[in-house]
Each structure stands twice: as structure tokens, then as C-alpha cells.
Image: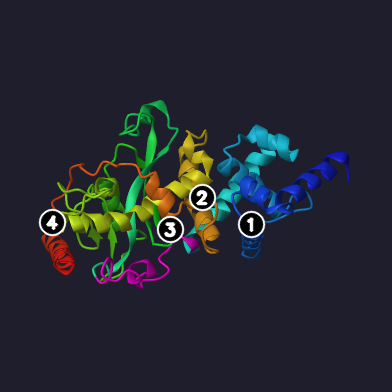
Amino acid sequence: MIDRDVERLRRLGRLYHGTEPNCISELRMRKDVFHRLCAELRSRALLEETVHVTIEEQLAMFIHAVGQNWPARAIAFEFLRSTEFVSRYFNLVLDALCVLARDLICIKSVETHSKITSSPGRFHPYFEGCIGALDGTHIPACVPIHMQDRFRGRKSITTQNVHAAIDFDLRFVYVLAGWEGSAHDSCVLQDALSRPSGLKIPEGKYFLADAGYAARPDVLPPYGGARYHLKEFRGTREPENARELFNLRHSTLRTTIERAFGTLKNRFKIFGSQPFFPFKTQVKIVMACCAVHNWILEDGPDEYVYDDVAWYEALPRSNHTRSNMRKENVAWSNKRDELANKMWEDKL
């Protein structure tokens, strides 16, 4: 072996056989989680290793690109490879993780989560059929000039509107990426529900949503025109009527998806700026990172997951006064009224 290969092996050994904190910092996950992911990709023949490169090195280069937001030239220098080599294996790992995402991004259980059942009188039995929350988030996107008007919405930069549904373990159960930043969340949700392979909500179950969505079967938003955000209830200000009480408890549960988005963006720094990839690749990166996020959470929360206390302390005020693009479904509006009134009666 030439000196370059010896030096590369030494660096790789320090990377994923070294200390746990270094592995978490560099590869965004613990050592055992990283090696299990490599074993999964190997056992399913999603990646192949050669005498020149292992699956561990391929995945490590990919994680540096999406986790640290390193350009190909910096990765090539660190791993003693060529930029062409880095780019080639980046795309191979990306495709492999997108295949893996089909099994990782799905509804695992329709049972009422312990977060609800463990809070009788507060969440249970009012949210008994709730299996998670859904919302959209804007991720910086790099698109050609002739497409930029469609991808510029509430943000000052071009973005893609990523719609996702999560469960109360912060796992993504559905992700739809690639919509223009100017698209309204209701339009993206309608597309997700109408696709043959789109979001399938089990009968009798529903997701929580913010006030940008209209009440409809399987989707339950809060009341508009009433206090909603947790910051508005801090101190001595208690809910003054049934609608405010419903909104308070709804908000406490729904912020789970904000924590999930925050964790995803905190772990993968590539979502903090416009990536210089073709747009189709940018869409695939979202899916791959959500799959890796779910894989990591199979072992429970880690250093990149915001806990409830830390999240509530830094809770941003989102815009919940956006007008709905669709009329609310009467049956689900009535269902919301029943839940709110029962909460208020039980409180009294």
C-alpha cells in the first residue's frame, strides 16, 4: 500500500472507530448506529464495496456532504480522493438511501401514543385517534433563473416546500418534497393525499395541523381567531373559553412536528443554505436525510433531538393566521367543537 492509502485508513479509523463524541460530531450519529446502517446497506446489496473503497467510507463521505455541508473539494482533500470519486459515490449512496427510505418512512403503528395515554384529563381521551402531526417546511433550493419566481414565497430566497407527517416519536411517516416555495400548504397536502403512493391515513385516525389548513376528514387544525401559541399562555393567563383550551392542548401536541423539523435541520447542515446540486438531486437529498433521521431514532433520541423543555424555551411564533384556501369540512368542524366543549366541561 502506498503512503496515501495508509494515511486514508488512519483517518477513517479515527473517524468511525474513534471516540463516540467525535463520531457524533463528524458523522451526526453514534458509532453503533453508523455501523448498523452500513451493515443494512451491505446486506440488502444497496451499495457495493471494492478493494479500493468500503461502504463505511462511502457513507462517511455522504454524511460529510449533507451533515457538515462540505463541498466535494473539501471532502476530496479530507479523504484523499478525487472530486470525481466523491461525486460518483455521493450519488450512489443517495440512491441507496432513497430506496431504504421506502421502508423507513412509513406509519409504524396506529395505536394511540403513550404521550397521549399518559396524560389522562389533558390529552386523553380527547386526542385518542390522533397518530401524529403534519405541516410544511421551507428548505433553501437552487433553481434556474426562469423558475425562481415560482420558488420564492414567504422567504427572501428560493425554497422548496417540503410537506411531512410525523408521529410522536419524531419519526417521519410521510415526506413529499419538490413543491415550489410559493405553493400553499393546503395545495401540497391535497397533492399528497391524491397520489396513488401518497399519504394514506388509516380509517378512524387523524393528524394535527396548524391553522393554515382547513378542517377536513383526517386532518384537525386549531380554531382561528383564538389564542393558540404556548407563549400566549405563559404566566398567569389561563384559557378563558373552550376554544382557547382546545388550542392550548392542540398546540402542545402539534409542536412535535416543529421539533422534528428543527432536529432534521440541526443534524443536516445542508438544509441551511442553497445547495449546488440539480434540483432533482436536492429533492432526493431531503428523502435520504429523512430516512437517516428515522434510522437514528430507532435507538431513541440523541444529541441532535430537541427535548420538550428546550424547544418550548426557544419556541418561535409561527404565522397561524394564514387564510385557508378551502372551506372547512362541516363534520370535522363539529368534531372539533365537541372535543373543545368536553375539555372545557371536564376542566370546570
Closer to us: 108 or 102: 108
Q: Which image quadrant: the C terminus? A: bottom left
Question: Quick check: can you spot residue 299?
Answer: yes
| Badge 2 element | helix
Q: Earlier in the sequence, mark 4 or mark 1?
A: 1
| Badge 3 element | loop
Q: Residues within 10 Å of mark 4 (few under 14, many from 20)?
A: few
| Location of residue 193 (image quadrant) | bottom left
Closer to us: 93 or 121: 121
Q: How is the image coloured?
A: rainbow
Q: Where's residue 262, x and y in %?
A: 43, 47
> In the displayed structure, does residue 25 sit left or right of residue 15?
left
Identify the mark at residue 34; answer none if there is no mark. 1
Distance from the alpha carbon under mark 2 to that under mark 4: 42 Å
Name the residue that disc number 3 marks. Answer: 170
> What span is in magenta?
104-125
Identify the mark at residue 289; answer none if there is no mark. 2
Identify the mark at residue 241; answer none if there is no mark. 4
Q: Are marks 3 and 4 in contact (CB under 8 Å)?
A: no
> In the displayed structure, does residue 129 sit left or right of residue 305?
left
- In this rendering, the label closer to the viewer, 2 or 3: 3
What amino acid type should be assigned to the residue bearing mark 1? Phe
Q: Where's residue 42, x and y in %?
A: 66, 61
What amino acid type should be assigned to the residue bearing mark 2? Cys
Distance from the alpha carbon under mark 4 to that under mark 1: 49 Å
Q: Residue at x 50, y 44 (%)?
A: 266
Q: Residues within 10 Å of mark 2 (few under 14, many from 20)?
A: many
Q: Residue at x 35, y 34 (%)?
A: 151
Q: Earlier in the sequence, mark 1 or mark 3?
A: 1
Q: Where's residue 46, x and y in %?
A: 61, 59
What amino acid type should be assigned to the residue bearing mark 4? Asn
Q: Earlier in the sequence, mark 2 or mark 1?
A: 1
